[in-house]
Image: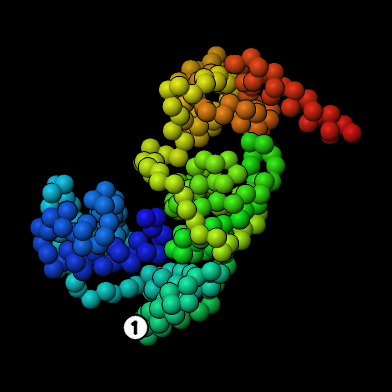
Amino acid sequence: MATNAIDQTRRMLSLVTYLRERPGARVGDVARAFGITEDELIADLDVLPMCGTSFRGGDLLDIDTDGDRIWWHNPDDVAEPLRLAADEATALLVAARAVATLPGLREGDRQALLRATAKLEAAAGEAAGASARLSVTFESEGGVFADVDRAIAERRRLWLRYYSPARDELTEREVDPIRLFAVGHTYMEAWCRLSEARRTFRLDRVAEIKLLDAPADPPPVELRDLSEGLVQPAAEDPEVSIEVGPGGRWVAEYYPHDSAEELPDGGLRITLRTPDPASLRRLALRLGRDGRIVAPQELADSARQAADQALAAYGE
């Protein structure tokens, strides 16, 4: 079953209490108790050591596992009363108020957040004063996130108007959301009814979104391991060669590649693989004088033709 961010947060908070009362708990027993797979539990355990009682990085949860049992080495440190500095209280209160305004947030979650915010304000005292003078507003991506999160929680289909940069066009489609994740940007993985395949959608490219009454029913799919990044070219993907000047060396930092050979002028000859070589035409246009596609020849010709058409449009 797909899990949204709020449900995962609830589970992890409960997991902390559960593990504190059961030192050395077995992985299988804990996974069964929470109704999740062992892989999902291990994923939660990978996140918990990055959490703690201080925004400054100290007092983190020292939790690890040997694959069979789970050990928490500093539960007594976490049990100490939380003391927030003024900047920590301000950051937490501003964030809490901002999240409470998100469209699509379930009312029960909103009320719980507001109650927690009120308690935090009372506990922070004078330190909470500065937060009242600050506010955060979310761009449209926040509303899209809330709708996707709700669709996942309620197992409902979504209608999208989505901008595809590879084709430079807006398309309309219905999708069955599977999960939300962040790798630099925030993405939704979903089963696309237009293409009848699994697709990944960047939330800031969603021009319009509607929650449908139809139930979401994506076919069973194995979730991709994103630890190596969103784009993971396969060995069988077509190979593309790009030459960039000194001003285009950033391409090697942003695009996974097989090799980057130094050129005499300070540039690079970059070799990479992609399942959709045509999508690199936009990269060629963006590079302008700082780079060009050299192989395969048909892609190089296509990129050159796109550049000529763009120049002609400027002339008109």
Quick one: 186 or 158, which is closer to the camera?
A: 158
Quick check: 87 left or right of 174?
left
Quadrant hosting residue 267: top right
The amino acid on which the numbered mark 1 sits, given as a three-letter code, is Ala
| Residue at screen point 19% across, 56% down | 63
Quick check: 212 left or right of 62?
right
| Residue at screen point 41% across, 70% down | 92
Q: Please say if 192 is above or below 298.
A: below
Q: Please say if 94 is above or below 28.
A: below
Label 1 crowd bin: few (<14), some (14–19), many (20+), radius 10 Å: some
- Disc 1 marks which residue? 123
- Give the colour scheme shown: rainbow
Quadrant hosting residue 294: top right
Q: Please say if 36 is above or below 255.
A: below
Q: Position of residue 249 (x, y in %)?
A: 54, 28
Which quadrant: the C terminus? Answer: top right
Quick one: 84 or 4, which is closer to the camera?
A: 4
Which quadrant: the N terminus? Answer: bottom left
Q: Position of residue 168 (x, y in %)?
A: 69, 39
Q: Please say if 75 is above or below 291.
A: below
Quick check: 261 left or right of 210?
left
Label 1's element?
helix
Quick check: 168 left or right of 103?
right
Q: Residue furthest right?
A: 316
| Residue at screen point 16% across, 66% down | 20
Q: Position of residue 65 (x, y in %)?
A: 16, 50
| Residue at screen point 35% across, 61% down | 8
- The answer to whether residue 142 is seen in the rendering is no
